[in-house]
Amino acid sequence: MSRETSPGMWLYGKLAYMKATIEIPDELYREAKIAAATQGVKIKDMVAEGLRMVLHAENAPVQRKRIKFPLIACGAPGTLQIPDDAAAQLDALEDLERHALSV
């Protein structure tokens, strides 16, 4: 073994690949195998591309949806009273936004 490789690494030309064992559901593997055969690619290449897509998607900036809040009329300046149903909707929107950012 050369200095350029370590246990578990295989050197193909100038590219090193890590061999890994993964467990995926049988049905998902069957679907992937069919898709790979249809596209004329190897399963390992399809998995590598899928991993790249997921990893690059996480680094992409999150595009947030603009939220349109309801206009609530008040009797006098500084005396805003939010109806319970509107407050509940605002709470739900905040929860959804927080959940979307944490996923």
Image (spheres, rainbow, N blue to C red):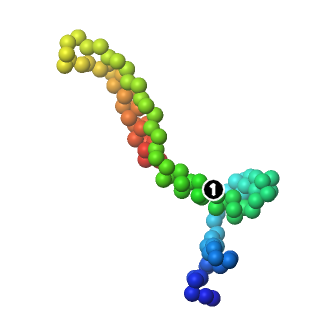
How far from the left and from the top, in percent, is residue 103?
Answer: 47, 47
Q: Is residue 53 left or right of residue 44?
A: left
10 Å crowding of disc 1: few (<14), some (14-19), many (20+): few
* Helix, strand or loop status at disc 1: helix
How far from the left and from the top, in percent, is residue 94?
Answer: 38, 35
* Residue at image point 59% right, 82% down: 5
- Quadrant of the frame with the N terminus: bottom right
Q: Is residue 75 left or right of residue 50?
A: left
Total marks in image: 1
- Furthest-front residue in view? 14
Q: Is residue 60 above or below residue 78?
A: below
For the residue marked with disc 1, what is the amino acid? Gly
Observer able to see residue 34: no
- Furthest-top residue in view? 75
How far from the left and from the top, in percent, is residue 79?
Answer: 20, 17
Q: Is residue 88 left or right of residue 38?
A: left
Residue carrying label 1: 50
Q: Nearer the viewer, residue 76 or 3?
A: 3
Q: Quarter-wise, where is residue 36 in the image?
A: bottom right
* Residue at image point 34% right, 25% down: 87
Q: Nearer the viewer, residue 66 or 94?
A: 66
